[in-house]
Amino acid sequence: MKAFENLSPATLDEAVELLGTARANGEIAYPAGGGSDLLGMVKDELVPAPDRIVDLKRIPGLDSIRSSENGTGIGGLVTVDALADDERIRSRYPVLAEAATAVGTPQIRNTGTIAGNVCQRPWCWYFRQGFACLKRGGDRCYSVTGENQQHAIFGGGPSFIVHPSDIANALVALDAEFQVTGPNGERSVPASDFFVLPRENLQRENVLESEELLIGISLPSAHADRPGAYRKVMDREAWTHAVVSVALTLDMDGALCRDARIVLGGVAPIPWRVPAAEDVLRGRQITAELAQQAADAALEGAQPLAKNGYKVTMARALVRRSVLELSGAA
Amino acid sequence: MTGITRRSFLGRSGAGIAATATLPALTTGPQQKAAAQQPGPAPRTRIALTVNGETHSLEVEDRWTLVEVLRDHLELTGTRIGCDRGECGACTVLLDGKNIFACSYLAVWADGKAVETVEGLARNGVLDPLQEAFIAHDAPQCGFCTSGQLMSAKALLSEGTEVTEANVREALAGNICRCSNFLNYQAAVARGEPGHPAAADPLRVVGRPTPRLDALERVTGQARYSPDIRLPGMLYARILRSPHPHALIRAIDVQAALDLDGVAAVLTHENCDIDWASGDLANRRMLFNNPVRYYGDAVAAVAATDRHTAEAAAQLIEVDYDTLPFVLDAEEALEPDAVPIQPGGNLAPPFGALRGGGAAVPGPAVYERGDVETGLAESDVVIEDHYVSKHHNNAQMEPRTAVAEWESGKLTIWTPTQGITNCRDDIAAAFGLPNEQVRVICEYMGGGFGNKNQCQDTDLIAAELARRTERPVKLELTRKEDFLSIHGRWPTSQYYRVGAKRDGTLHAIELRGYSGMGPHIKSSGDIAGIDFYQCPNVSKAVHTVHTNVTTSANYRAPSYPQGVFGIASVLDRICDEIDMDPLDFHLKNATRRYRDATPYTSYGLIDCIEQGAEAFDWRNRRRPVEADAGPIKRGTGMAIGAFTARLGLSNAVLRLDDAGTLWLHAGVTDIGTGAKTTLAMIAAEAMEMDLDQVEIVWGDTDRSPYSVGESGSRTTSHTGYAIVEAAEDLKRQLAERGPPGPGEELVAEASPNPSLDGEQRYSFAAHFVELEVDTELGGVQLTKYVAAHDSGRIVNPLTATSQVKGGVIQGIGMALHEELLYDRNTGIPVNPGYYGARIMTHLDTVPIDVVFVETQDAHGPMGAKSIGESTIIPVVGAIANAIFNATGKRIKELPISRDRVIGAMS
C-alpha cells in the first residue's frame, strides 16, 4: 500500500469536515468503519490510493442498539457480530439477526459494521480482479459476454453486479430508515430508496453523496415481532456472498397471511423486493400451492444472462420453501 | 462507516482510475506513473499496543497492518500471512477478546487495545489445554494455519458458550486448512475422540498412533517458516507481472524505479538471462521471458529497502507491450490457425521422452495393448463419452517466499520446498556453481501438495537480486501471485470409447485426451485411471498442449482424480446399461496385475473394495437410480484408485552418541505429512529403541543427506528403506564394538538404490460415498464417506488417517466447487484466491470413515508402502457416480457446482 495518514476524529462533524477538507485539497480520503473491505480494495488498487483514511471507530455513541416504543435504533458502528447476538434483534427482528449471522466469517463479523456491510462495494469477480469495468470508470461490463454465472437476473444494465450485502435485504424487508449525515446536515432515507440501480448511477450502489456517512438505522415497531427468516444459498458453505438469498417476514393470523415482505438477494444490483409475490400471499391462507404461486410471481420478469439462468430455478425454490417453512405450512 | 464514499474521488479522478487500461494489471498501469514522485516520509503514529499482556509503545506507519507490526516489528511470527486479504484466517488474533483478521486491520486502529496471539497461549511454560488437544488430535499437518485455528477456537471457548460440533465448525469457519485437517481441528476443540483405526499388528513403535514430534513447535508458533526469516540488512523484492495473456515486450523502462529512494536493483529479461531449467522440460524458460505467455508471467523484479518501496518501484516500471492473440483451451490450441505459443508449436512432446532426454518430437503419449477396434466390435455394450476437468489449485496456505544470502561465494536460501536436494541442485545449475556452494534450508513449510517440488523461480530471482546487491533479499509472493504462478492441476478434455460384455467383463478402453498445460511443460500432463482395470484391449493417447494460462504443476496425484472422474463415470454408465451393481463390476474388473501383465509386490485392492463396501453397508444403502421422487435425491457411488509406491535411491545417516541418543539425519522437510515422525519411528523400531531416544536432523542440505524429495508419496518407502539399512549396519557395529564410550559415537550411512525385479509396487484404495442432491438449489450434501486404503503396514495410524481425510476433503472441493476460472474474452482469471476459487472451509467438511487394509509389502520398511496421493484419487469419480445414482443425470464437466446441477436437471 502507498503511504497514507490515518485520522481519528472524535465526532461525526469532525469526520465529515476531514473528508471535505481532504477533497477540497485535491486529496483522496475514505471513511473506515470496520475497514476490512476498504483495506482489501486499497491493497488491490481497486480504488485510487488514499492520502487519508478517516477512522470512524473512535467516534462515541454509534455502536449501540437502542429500543423504544417507536422501534429500534442501531448505530452505524454496531458490529455485525453484535447485531447477530443481540437478544432484542434476535427475538423481535429475526430476519435481521439471521442475515447478520449469514455474513462472512466470525472474524469479519467481529470487525465489520452494519453500515459498512450495507455499503460494501460489489464482489463481482471482474470488479474485484481490477478489470476496468463500468463500476471502475471503464467502458463496459465484462460479465455481459463473459463469465456471468454470478450476475444479475433482475435490474441489470448497463452493469450486471449483484448487491453483496445480506443485511441490506433484511433491512429492506423491515422497511428500515437509514440515517445519513453529511456536509448539509442529517437526512433520513427509507431503505427502499437507499439503494440505486446502475442505470440510475453507475458509480455507486446507494444514494450517499460525497462525504455523507450512514450513521444509523431505525427499525419501525410496525415490523417488530414478525416471524422472519433469512435463507442464503452459497457456492461453498462459508465466507462467500449469496448466489441467491431471500429475506422474508410474514405477519400471520393463524394460517392467514396478513402481510408479507419478500426481498431477494444475489439476483439484482440492489436488494430486490418482489411485491407481486407479496401480493399473492397477502390475505390468503398459506398452502404449498400458494407458496408456489408466490415463488412464480417472484421470478416473473427475470432476465437471465447466458450462464445464470439457474438462479431463476434456485430463487423460485428458495422463495417457495422459505414461505412454507416460516408459515409452518410445510 | 460507509465502505467508501465514491464521489469524492470519482469526481476528481474518474479518468485516472482505469480509463486508459482495458485490462487489470497486477500492479498499476501506466496511467498512475506520471503522478508518482519521490514520496515524502510515510505518516507515522505512536501507539500503545498490549500484546499478550505486555504493553508496547511503538511508532508505526499508519499504513502498517496489525499482522505486519506483530511479525516484522514485534517479532511475533507465530501469526502467519496466508492471503493478506481476510480470506484464509492464518493471521487470526484476538483483539479485545474477539477474533479478527490481523491482515485486514491497521495497527493504528488497535491503539490502546489488547491483542492476543498464539505466543500468549502457553503460560509459564504450560501449554493451553487447547494446544494439548491440538497435539493429541494431530490437528496441525503443515501447521501454517494452526495459530489462526487456535485463536478462533480460543475466542469460542472464552465466550463460555457450550461447545458443540456445530458451533465449533461455525467458530472456525473463517480458518481454512488446505491440508484439510478440518476434522481433527474440530475434534480437538470439541474434545471428541481422535478418529483413527488401530493398526492390525502394531510393533514396538511402528503401528502405534504417535503425535508428531514437532507438534509442539507447530502449536506454539515457534516453528520457523521461510516467511519468518529476517536477516540484518535484508532487502525486500517484488515482481512485476504481465497484464496480458500473450504479448511481446517491445521496451521496458526501469529508470523511474531505479530513481526511487531505497531501490537497489531491478531485473528484467534485458539484464538477466538466467535459465529456470526446472520450469520447463520442453522449452528454454528464463526467469523473465519475452514474449510473456500468460497473465501473471514475470516481467521484472525489484529489490528495495522495504516491501512498500519495492511495491511502489515495481509500479514505476514502464512496459510497452505488443499484444498477441491468445488461446486458453487445449483443443483450440491445436487448431491449424491457433497462435503458436512456443517455437515448436502448441503440441508438446510426450513427457516420458522429455524426461528421458531423448529425441523430443511433438506428439501424444501413446499406450496400447490388444486391439481396441476389435475389442469394441466384440463388445456387447459400447459407451462413447466426453468429460472435462478444470484447473484446480493446490492453494497451500504458505505463499511462496524465498530469502537468499551470499557469503564468500556461497549461496544460502531459505525456501519452502518439498525437496531440499533437488532444489539445491537446480539452483546450483542455474548459477553454474558446484552443489556444495549452495545451501538450501527448509525446516518448516506450509504445504505444497506437489507444487513446491524442485526450485522455484522465486528462489532464483531472490538469489540473483542478492548477488547483485550484495545484501540478503527476501521475495514474498502475494496470494494472487501464488495462484497465478506455477500452480494447480491441469485441465483436461477426455474422449472415451469403452466396451464390455453383457456379463460385465470389461473388454475395450479407448482414451483420447488433451491436457492444457499452460505455456510450459513442467509436469506429465497425463490422464490416468484406466490402469486400475483389467482389460484386454486398450488404446490411450494423451496430448499435452501449450495454452496461455497459468502453467500447471503437480497437485496431489497429479494425473489421477481428473482421469478417474472420466473413466469411473464411463464405467458407471456401463453398469447402468447392463444393470450391474458397480460393486460387482469392480470386484470383477479391478486390476490384479499391473496392465494385466506384471505382478504387484503386494495387493490389497479387492480387500479394500470388500472391506470398504462392508463398512459403508453398500448392499443395503445402494438403491436404484433416482429412487427419490422429491427435489432432494439421495444416491451412492464408488470408485477405486491405485498409486505407485516407488523405491529408489535414498540416503540416511544414523549416529549413536555416548548418551544413548540416536541421531537420524534425513533430507526431508516434512511438508505436513508427518514424515519426520514416521522416519524417526522407523529408526526407533529398526534399532529396537524408544522413540524419545531418537533425534532427527532435517531440512538443511548442509546437515542432512540426499533425499529424493517429498513428492510421489515416496518418503516412507525411499528414506525409510535407507534408515532400515543404516540401522542394520549400526546394529552390526554395536554388536562388534559395543556402545560408544565417552566422547565417541557410532555412525552408519546407507545409500541404497533398490529396484524391483519384474514387479510393480502399488498402494490401492476404494472409496464409497452417499450424498443428497438438492435438484432445485443445486447443492450436493455428502452424508457418508468411507475410504478404504491398502498402503501396506501403517507406520503411524494417527498421521496416516489425517492424510486420508485431508486428501478426501481436497477431492470433495475439486468435485463440487473449486476451479480457477478464466474470462475467455481477455484470457484473465477472474477468481484467483481463497474467496474466488471457493476453497473448502470447515463448514464444507463431512465425517470420513477410514479403513486400512494392511498388506505386508516385502520391499517396504516394515511392510509400509505409500499413502499421501492415493487418498484423493477416487474422490471425484465416486461423487460424480453418486450424483448420477441420485438424480439419473450424468454431469460431465467439473466442478459439479450448483449451476451445473440445476442445468443438468432442466
Image (cartoon, coloured by chain):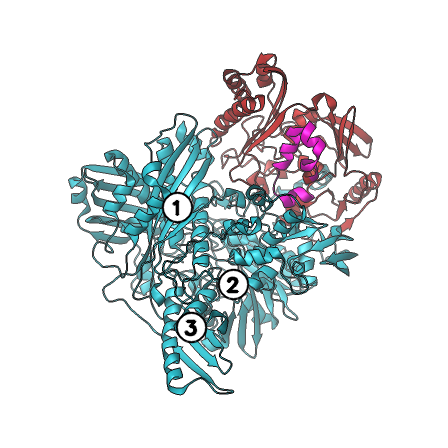
Instruction: Give the residue type at disc 2.
Output: Pro
Assess disc 2: are there few (<14), some (14-19) or many (≥20) residues with their C-alpha within 10 Å of its C-alpha.
many
Instruction: Give the residue type at disc 1.
Output: Val
| Residue A107 forms part of the magenta stretch | yes
Task: Give the Cα distance between marks 1 and 2.
Answer: 33 Å
Could you say whether the residue bearing mark 3 is in a helix, strand or loop? loop
Can marks 1 and 2 be said to lie on one chain? yes
- B54 and B36: which is toward the camera: B54
Q: Is residue B786 left or right of residue B604?
A: right
Image coordinates of residue B112 in percent, x first then y, are 78, 53
Q: Is residue A302 left or right of residue B688?
A: right
The label number, if any, that marks residue B786 in the structure image: 1
A285 to B273, vertically: above or below:
above
Question: Residues in magenta?
Answer: A82-111
- B804 and B295: which is toward the camera: B804
Image coordinates of residue B626 in percent, x first then y, are 35, 30
Q: Nearer the viewer, mark 1 or mark 2?
A: 1
